[in-house]
Every structure is written in structure tokens, then in C-alpha cells.
Image: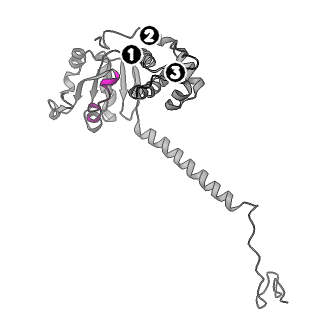
């Protein structure tokens, strides 16, 4: 099987918009679920709903792949899985190195979904000498002093950074110098890379902050709706009570409502 280091996928990816590329994994995930249930075909409406997009956008995205489906039948699930996997380069073996084997790095190393999606955790690297030789997910952790050799020996072109933010840029620089051309960054910092190196950032705190914004907005909308309901002019006003005779009215000694 070809490795990611020596072979690049011969696809039409350069002609596919970035927004479409970002949606292809969503389609693939939905299609894989259908395949596992032995569903042979799927309509654009059903697949779009499963992927969380509208059907017109899905059909436009698939047109870039040269796949238009069959009227009245839909799309062949297995063929689409193959098409999208090939376009994303997932029909190859992509060796991945994870740098920073703390809680997050160890969790990623133990994640079982990489292999079925074309990725193989080939190396685990950490700066702590005490970690060297420690097995994590069946792979011995190696020291960062040997990073260049590790990348070269394993043909790694994709690096995953799960270090503290202060060490992330230095690790990134070393990965790039060793030949890594794609980086997935989990460290909460922005990395500077030369042209030709792709970086994808995963910041869990930012995602949580965005969710907090939406929760706050929903709470505000609910409060506003409740306030509007209380001020509804169509609601029947409570009946006025007569002021007792022995009480003074607002304008002086006369009571607001005279007794009978």
C-alpha cells in the first residue's frame, strides 16, 4: 500500500472549492453509516438531511466529483463512499505522528477510528524523558530529540500537535523542517508556517465559547418572549377595586371612588 509520503492522490482536488472539500467528510460519514446498514441507494434529500446541508448544495458538490445520481433511484452508496474516499486521499495509508502525549495526545492515540479512515498512528513523541519507551495504545513513546529521524523513518507527512501552547511553535518548526507538510494543531495558539504547509486548528475552548454565545442568545430571546407575553395588550386587565370610604384619593381628601 502506498504511503502518504511518497504518493499524492491523483484527483481533481484543485478544481473543487474549499467549501465543498470541507463538506466531503460530512457526506462520507453519513454514507458510511448507510453502508453499514446495507442501504444500497440514497436520494439527495435523504443524504443532505443526514449530512446537515440542503439538497441543492449537495447536488452541486457532487457535480464536482462527476457524480450526478440516477433520476428516480438516487446515488449508489458504495460508489459514493469510494469516490469521496478517493478524492480525500483516504484510499491510501497516511502515517501520522502525534507530538505531546499528555491526556489529549494519549486519547487520540487510543482512538480506534483512524485506521478505518485511511490514517495510521505511526509515532508518538514527547519531550518528557520519563515518557520514553512507555507504551501508549501499543506504541512506544519516543523522545523529541529523535523527531527528525522518527519522521523520516516512518514517512510521516501529517503531524498532530497536542503540546502546551508555549511549545507548539517550536514543535511545528521542527516538524516542518523534518518534512511534514500538513499539521493538525490542538494547542490553543496560532502557528506560523511557510507556504506549502497546511494547518488545521482544533480549539475546543473556542467551540465552547461559540456554544455559550448561542445559549446566551436563546436565553435572551426566551426572556424577551416572556416579557412580551406579560405586556400583551389583548390580555384582559384585572378589575379595578373601589377605594374604601375611609381612604383618601390621590388628589386630596376626597376618596377616589365615592361610597354609595
Estimate the x, y position of residue 91 in percent, counting from the top left: 35, 15
Question: Mark 2 highlights which residue?
Answer: 11
Q: Is residue 197 left or right of residue 46?
A: left
| Label 2: how many Cα within 10 Å (few below 14, some 14–19, many 20+) | few
Q: Are marks 1 and 2 in contact (CB under 8 Å)?
A: yes
Residue ID for mark 1: 89
Instruction: Please report the bounds of the magenta region as a residue range.
Output: 106-117
The residue that label 3 is drawn on is 20
Q: Residue at x 37, y 18 (%)?
A: 90
Foreground of the two, 162 or 224:
224
Q: Earlier in the sequence, mark 1 or mark 3?
A: 3
Q: Does the magenta segment cover residue 109? A: yes
Image quadrant where residue 89 sits: top left
Q: For label 1, count other residues whose C-alpha is less than 10 Å away and answer few (under 14), some (14-19) or many (20+).
A: many
The answer to which quarter of the image holds residue 142 is top left
Q: Residues within 10 Å of mark 3 (few under 14, many from 20)?
A: some
Counting from the top left corner in percent of width and height, residue 244 is at 76, 87
Q: Helix, strand, or loop for circle 2?
A: loop
Q: Quadrant of the C terminus?
A: bottom right
How far apart are the two marked residues, 1 and 3, measured between alpha carbons? 15 Å
Which residue reaches farthest bottom? 246
- Sequence-earlier tag: 3 or 2: 2
Q: Where is 221 relative to 5, above or below?
A: below
Amino acid at each position: 500500500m502506498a504511503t502518504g509520503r511518497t504518493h499524492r492522490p491523483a484527483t481533481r482536488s484543485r478544481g473543487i472549492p474549499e467549501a465543498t472539500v470541507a463538506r466531503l467528510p460530512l457526506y462520507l460519514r453519513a454514507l458510511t453509516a448507510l453502508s453499514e446498514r446495507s442501504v444500497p441507494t440514497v436520494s439527495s434529500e435523504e443524504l443532505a438531511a443526514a449530512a446537515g446541508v440542503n439538497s441543492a448544495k449537495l447536488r452541486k458538490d457532487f457535480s464536482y466529483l462527476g457524480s450526478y445520481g440516477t433520476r428516480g433511484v438516487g446515488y449508489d452508496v458504495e460508489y459514493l463512499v469510494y469516490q469521496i474516499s478517493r478524492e480525500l486521499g483516504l484510499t491510501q495509508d497516511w502515517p501520522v505522528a502525534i507530538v505531546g502525549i499528555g491526556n489529549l495526545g494519549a486519547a487520540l492515540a487510543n482512538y480506534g477510528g483512524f485506521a478505518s479512515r485511511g490514517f495510521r498512528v505511526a509515532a508518538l513523541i514527547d519531550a518528557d524523558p520519563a515518557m520514553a519507551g512507555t507504551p501508549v495504545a501499543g506504541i512506544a513513546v519516543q523522545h523529541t530529540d529523535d523527531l527528525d529521524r522518527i519522521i523520516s523513518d516512518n514517512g510521516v507527512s501529517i503531524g498532530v500537535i497536542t503540546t502546551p501552547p508555549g511549545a507548539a511553535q517550536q514543535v511545528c518548526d521542527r516538524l516542518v523542517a523534518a518534512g511534514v507538510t500538513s499539521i493538525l494543531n490542538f494547542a490553543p495558539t496560532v502557528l506560523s508556517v511557510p507556504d506549502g504547509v497546511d494547518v488545521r486548528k482544533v480549539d475546543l475552548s473556542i467551540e465552547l465559547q461559540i456554544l455559550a454565545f448561542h445559549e446566551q442568545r436563546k436565553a435572551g430571546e426566551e426572556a424577551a418572549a416572556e416579557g412580551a407575553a406579560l405586556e400583551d395588550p389583548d390580555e384582559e386587565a384585572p378589575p379595578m377595586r373601589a377605594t374604601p370610604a375611609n381612604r383618601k384619593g390621590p388628589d386630596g381628601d376626597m376618596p377616589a371612588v365615592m361610597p354609595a
